[in-house]
Image (cartoon, rainbow, N blue to C red):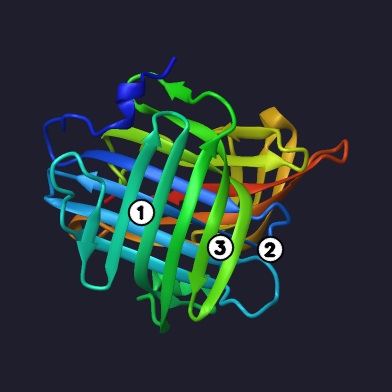
């Protein structure tokens, strides 16, 4: 069982690699849009990494990708999860432990027509991105002993992209993890993850993912233990510059899943591609 007290922040470990992260993703049931938020508190470096993204999985009025990536956000004060810097305000509130979280974001992101631009300087037009969303648990949190837990949720509220306001009634996962995390090692733990919901609402998640990538982007992915294959609908990658100019590529792809018996699902797949050793 996950302890309700674990929803709060944890005492940092020694060294610069220790990180505590809170992650939230969402998707419309038909896969037409989705997004995610990740707050990574890195006290050894004295900064917070903040990512937020919105993607559109079908042709329409929305940009295919709006990305917020800031690795120089000041640390939250006290036990709060509110962060603020130039062009970014965000707060993450546990309303009821292991049951209900709210996330608010007001930021300027960059609209990218090609997701590969996320690995090549993030050149694009500034675009307002706002989130006023609630994650409500649909089942108990799934613990990862000593490192955190994750939980399936329904997600509802509003998304602001540019001048457009979108009502969301979707599904997603949230996770909370803490411990040492070396993003740039070839042997880094948890290089892949996949999670989503079947069309009947049944959730699933796994780290057993066989992904095929090209230049850091996921082309296809198989979840063999679950009998699912994933086809990306949209990509929301981030670049992780590290020591010595070495950069890890992380792709998060909004996907449509299919099983041989015809079951279908929507969710996210992520794949980490560390730089070559040396």
Rendered residue at 11%/31% (across/down): 14
Q: Which is more foreground, mark 1 or mark 3?
A: 3
Vertical relation: 61 (above or below) 134 = below
Expressed as whole percent of the image width and height from the top left, the position of residue 239 reads: 36, 62
Q: Quadrant of the N terminus?
A: top left
In the picture of the structure, the residue carrying the numbered disc 2 is 32
Among all residues in the image, which is located at the extreme bottom? 125
Residue denoted by label 3? 235
Q: Taking 265 as reference, is 24 left or right?
A: left
Dot 3 crowding, Cα within 10 Å, few <14, some 14–19, many 20+: many
Secondary element type, mark 3: strand
Q: Is residue 245 visible?
A: no
Mark 2 or 1, nearer chain start: 2
The percent position of residue 91, horizontal first and vertical second, equals 31, 53
CA gap, disc 1 and disc 3: 20 Å
Q: Nearer the viewer, mark 2 or mark 1?
A: 2
What is the spatial separation of the Cα atoms under label 2 and label 1, in whole angstroms?
A: 32 Å
At horizontal 60% and vertical 63% (from top left) the residue drawn is 167
Q: Which residue is mark 1?
A: 275
Q: Position of residue 209 (x, y in %)?
A: 59, 38
- Please tell me in which quadrant of the rendered image residue 63 appears: bottom right
């Amino acid at each position: 069982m996950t302890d309700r007290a674990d929803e709060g922040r944890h005492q940092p470990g020694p060294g610069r690699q220790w990180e505590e992260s809170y992650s939230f993703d969402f998707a419309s049931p038909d896969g037409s849009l989705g997004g995610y938020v990740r707050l990574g508190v890195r006290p050894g470096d004295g900064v917070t990494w903040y990512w937020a993204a919105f993607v559109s999985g079908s042709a329409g009025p929305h940009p295919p990708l709006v990305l917020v990536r800031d690795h120089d956000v000041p640390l939250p004060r006290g036990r709060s999860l509110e962060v603020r810097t130039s062009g970014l305000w965000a707060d993450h509130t546990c309303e009821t432990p292991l049951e209900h979280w709210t996330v608010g974001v007001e930021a300027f992101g960059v609209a990218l027509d090609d997701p590969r631009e996320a690995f090549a300087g993030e050149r694009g037009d500034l675009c307002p991105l706002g989130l006023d969303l609630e994650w409500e648990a649909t089942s108990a949190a799934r613990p990862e002993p000593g490192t955190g837990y994750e939980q399936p949720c329904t997600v509802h509220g509003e998304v602001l992209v540019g001048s457009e306001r979108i009502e969301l009634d979707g599904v997603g996962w949230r996770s909370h993890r803490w411990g040492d995390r070396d993003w740039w090692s070839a042997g880094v733990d948890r290089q892949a993850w996949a999670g989503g919901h079947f069309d009947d609402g049944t959730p699933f998640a796994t780290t057993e993912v066989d992904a095929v990538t090209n230049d850091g982007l996921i082309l296809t992915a198989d979840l063999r233990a679950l009998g699912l294959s994933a086809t990306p609908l949209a990509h929301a990658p981030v670049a992780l510059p590290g020591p010595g100019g070495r950069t890890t590529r992380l792709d998060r792809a909004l996907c449509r899943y299919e099983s041989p018996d015809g079951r279908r699902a929507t969710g996210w797949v992520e794949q980490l591609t560390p730089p070559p050793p040396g």
